[in-house]
Amino acid sequence: MSILVGKHTRLVVQGITGREGAFHTKQMIDYGTPVVGGVTPGKGGEWAFGNVPVFDTVRDAVSATGANTSIIFVPARFAADAIIEAADAGIDLVVCITEGIPVMDMVLVRAFLDSTHTRLIGPNCPGLITPDEAKVGIIPGHIMTKGNVGLVSRSGTLTYEVVYALTARGIGQTTAVGIGGDPINGTSFLDVLQMFEQDPETEQVILIGEIGGTDEQMAAEYIANKMTKPVTGFIAGQTAPPGRRMGHAGAIISGGEGTAAEKIAALIQAGAKVARHPDEIADLVASNLH
Amino acid sequence: MNLHEYQSKRVFGRYGIPVPSGEVATTPGEVREIAIRFGRPVVVKSQVLVGGRGKAGGIKLAKNPDEAEQHADDILGMTIKGLTVKKVLVDPAADIRKEIYLGAVLDRASRRVTLMASSEGGIDIEEVAAKTPDKIVKVAAHPFLGLKPHQARILADGIGLPKDLTNDFIKIAQSLYQVFVSNDASLAEINPLVITGENKLLALDGKISVDDNALYRHPELVEMRDPDEEDASEREARRYGLSYIHLDGEIGCMVNGAGLAMATMDIVKLYGGEPANFLDIGGGAQADKVAAALRIILSDRRVKAVLINIFGGITRCDEVARGVLEAIGTLDVRVPFVVRLVGTNEEEGRRILAEANLITGVSLADAAQKAVAAAKGELQ
Ligand SMILES: Nc1ncnc2c1ncn2[C@@H]1O[C@H](COP(=O)(O)OP(=O)(O)OP(=O)(O)O)[C@@H](O)[C@H]1O
Ligand SMILES: [Mg+2]
């Protein structure tokens, strides 16, 4: 078992003929991910990588291939429409890699998605990977090993760093999920923790957070009250300077300011172990194994 | 990107929010002339992109043109939180009966634009929020509906606004919401919104911050950018698509990915060093971008060692290595480099760098410890 992506995944790539889209599609195919089609407006009827059909719209791709998952590599100014298009076409899981989408676009996209059954991962994320089954994103496949640790993270390369250390110690993973670093995203830490809690193969979970927002604090509440599996946390940005503040609104909206210290305290309070630096995460995970 | 007070109030004015008829000046002489023309007491206000100007002595009331000129002379050139004042706004002094707070911001938790109001506006609003949170009233606008009149009325009632001002307040609150969404703001704030002696509402201060990712669709806002908002190296970094923030430490950091960059700074600090910067070269950086990043890091004379931490995914270690070589070949490098390359094409990257004789780290912790030691001159 695993979460979100696996043997059942039938993937369509939005932006398959672009530079990034083409490069990563090749990697996903090489990893063994079932890529059933691609979408590039104006290029419908062509083929990519010899045997992957290209369509003008996601709707066409879904009706011809039965795709259930999409991944988005289109430029930021077109990405919001691409997400909505995928949801309109009935896609179950949309993974948006694109970074730099205007926040107000995401406010509208999230409100729209709430009226559909579609789940969004990202944007501004490395996607997700279930070792030996499916890679939907840009996480390097060769650093992953099959196993029993679930991983959820707001940061891309920091995820690679941690997976690499786990694999080096022979500790495998169920699924690694990058939820992205933007202020408004499709799937939160809390959502993913709930899925790992339900997944019979996942025995423990790593949560990699960052400064900003209160997503980690909400995850901590769930860890304290509902989670039975051990959680190891890390929060990046402990030394980040506060920055020049313009108005007062940021400070009075939520009471908290989203500092690393607040988040670390919340996780420890919830019973999670918190690493001081990334290399320590694998040590803490290993200590849960015995 | 942040707008100055005078720019923000011009935007407010265009959306129908009542603002004073002020003018901008760069010399005490101009300020004097403006004060003479207004023919009444004025307020001389420093225009720098940071909050809390009043508390820092950057806002002064002048009863006559002589005083206005004197205040301008004091304020122009003064430093507020590290920023030099180059411009002042001269506004007619308002007869203030009450100061109110009204602000719009995105609430990440509810994913909605939220309007907040308080009867205790003015320069101590943060203290009010911390000590008496019940004095802050909030409503969240549904993205498909916008801010509805009844929501603005809830704010008006919640702060005990006199009933005869409710309709004007509703218009202002709805306009502020429009300012926010139409300009892709991340902040739109009026503090204070005052009730004047003539029983009118007037926005005395304005702050707008704009989402950088949305600037492509707001060319008129881009034109308002104050180049002094960033220092020269930050501006240079933006030209290359690098995300760079200058700090005060001695260890220059070059990393790919924002999360890993922050974690790298954290670990430098953990081992007793101070990061000189935050620098994320982004995904898939080519050699020329890497060389530019190193040039920017080395232009900071305080840097005593450089820590390069790359986890290749889309970014290729051989490209990074070529960029490092290019930088070493063309720049006057006076400080030790500690390099850690892992991931895509790491062997090729290490081979390219072997001839340069740099210090290498096997793990992030190892590299960080070596960088701290190198900065102290304990490692060559
Ligand atoms: N035109 C004016 N007439 C009279 N008083 C004024 C005027 N403009 C500002 N003030 C007074 O100066 C105070 C501070 O001014 P303002 O809010 O513009 O600057 P600020 O200190 O930068 O604000 P903030 O703390 O919100 O960053 C106001 O609360 C108000 O009491
Ligand atoms: Mg103010």
Image: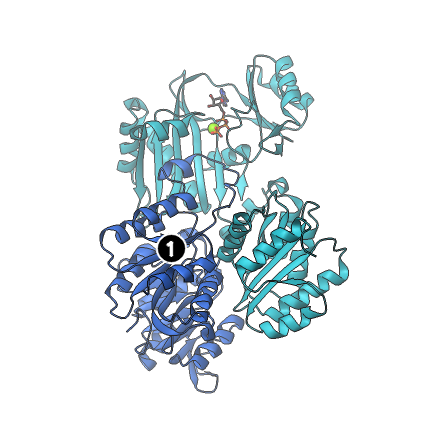
Chain colours: A blue, B cyan
**Front in this rendered view, residue A13 or A28:** A28
Residue A22, horizontal then vertical, whole percent? 50, 76
Residue at the image point whose x is 72% and y is 66% from the top? B356
Please name the residue that numbered disc 1 is placed on. A233
Q: On the rendered image, what quadrant is the C terminus of chain B found in?
A: bottom right
Residue B313, horizontal then vertical, whole percent? 52, 69
Q: In the displayed orientation, state which residue is furthest to the bottom.
A: A50
**Front in this rendered view, residue A273 or B236:** A273
Residue B255 visible at all: no
Q: How many marks?
A: 1
Amino acid type at mark 1: Gly
Residue B106 occupies quadrant: top left
Residue at the image point whose x is 44% and y is 65% from the top? A126
Residue B153 visible at all: yes
Residue A188 occupies quadrant: bottom left
Residue A182, horizontal then vertical, whole percent? 43, 54
Residue at the image point whose x is 32% and y is 68% from the top? A93
Please state the chain letter of the residue tagged with numbered disc 1 in the rendered image: A
Q: In this rendering, is residue A239 above or below A133?
A: above
Q: In this rendering, is residue A276 above or below A30?
A: above
**Front in this rendered view, residue B121 or B265:** B265
Using residue B213 as the reference point, say whether residue A85 is left or right of it: left
Label 1, ligand 1: CB separation under 8 Å: no
Q: In this rendering, is residue A66 above or below B49?
A: below
Residue at the image point whose x is 35% and y is 35% from the top? B116
Mark 1: which secondary structure?
Answer: strand
**Front in this rendered view, residue A149 or B296:** A149
- Decide: few, some or many residues near mark 1? Use Cα within 10 Å; few <14, some 14-19, many ≥20: many
Residue B49, horizontal then vertical, whole percent? 56, 36
